[in-house]
């Protein structure tokens, strides 16, 4: 007979659990077929909230159909030496491409957390954003970063800029 036992707490550990927010999918690109790249909603310069220009363009795109995106949720708890890996689900509402010199290097998808992979699951939480990156300049969006809300121009929401973009 086997027993499951929770890992013991490290004595005196005060570190909080944290979420791994940047995950690369090295096997394949994320499926972004719900983005209607033929229907641009608008263009604007990407400026931080403090008014500084970033030299990027934001392109608004239409969402083709109601889409539920599965994304990795990884939480590390250093005090109990554990990692929890699961999936979160986001109902896509808006999409913004972030480009430099006309070439998109990231897509930000804003939406609402839902309880599962089908549209009949209820909404479970607040607004969240996923940012999909083409890290290597190949046109393959193989990396995702998760955010819990936030305004696009705030310092914590400025997208990671891959080396090939600079």
Image: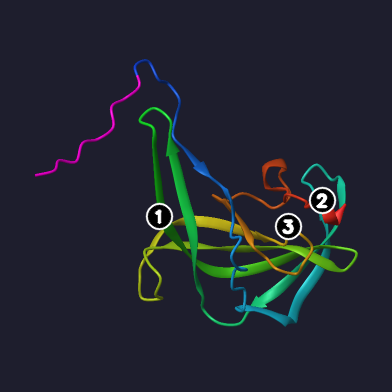
Quadrant in the picture for the N terminus: top left
Highlighted magenta segment, given as a residue range: 1-10
Q: Is residue 29 above or below residue 148?
A: below
In this figure, what is the number of numbered marks?
Answer: 3
From the viewer's perspective, tell me whether residue 92 is left or right of residue 164: left
Q: Residue 44 location, x and y as percent?
A: 83, 64
Lower sequence index among marks 3 and 2: 3
Q: Is residue 7 magenta?
A: yes
- Say what secondary structure mark 1 lies in: strand
Q: Nearer the viewer, residue 35 or 72?
A: 72
Residue wearing tag 2? 163
- Say what secondary structure mark 3 lies in: loop
Q: Nearer the viewer, residue 115 or 123?
A: 115
Marks 3 and 1, how far apart at CA: 24 Å
From the viewer's perspective, tell me whether residue 17 is left or right of residue 54: left
Residue wearing tag 3? 135
Q: Are marks 2 and 1 in contact (CB under 8 Å)?
A: no
Identified at 58% across, 60% down, the residue is 25
Residue at the outermost left position: 1
Identified at 85% across, 56% down, the residue is 165
From the viewer's perspective, tell me whether residue 114 is left or right of residue 133: left
Q: Are marks 3 and 2 in contact (CB under 8 Å)?
A: no
Q: Main secondary structure of the magenta part?
A: loop
Lower sequence index among marks 2 and 1: 1
Identified at 40% across, 20% down, the residue is 13
Residue at the outermost front position: 1
- Say what secondary structure mark 2 lies in: helix
Residue wearing tag 1? 86
Q: Is residue 26 above or below residue 166?
A: below
């Amino acid at each position: 007979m086997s027993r499951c036992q929770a890992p013991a707490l490290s004595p005196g550990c005060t570190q909080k659990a944290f979420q791994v927010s940047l995950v690369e999918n090295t096997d394949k690109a994320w499926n972004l077929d719900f983005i209607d790249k033929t229907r641009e909603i608008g263009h604007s310069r990407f400026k931080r909230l403090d008014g500084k220009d970033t030299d990027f363009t934001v392109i608004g795109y239409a969402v083709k159909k109601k889409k539920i995106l599965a994304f990795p949720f990884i939480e590390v708890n250093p005090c109990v030496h554990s990692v929890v890996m699961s999936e979160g689900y986001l109902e896509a509402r808006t999409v913004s491409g972030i480009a430099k010199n006309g070439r998109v290097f990231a897509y930000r998808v804003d939406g609402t957390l839902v309880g599962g992979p089908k549209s009949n699951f209820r909404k479970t939480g607040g607004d969240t954003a996923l940012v999909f990156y083409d890290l290597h300049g190949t046109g393959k969006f193989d990396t995702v970063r998760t955010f819990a809300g936030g305004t696009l121009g705030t310092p914590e929401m400025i997208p990671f800029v891959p080396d090939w973009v600079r």
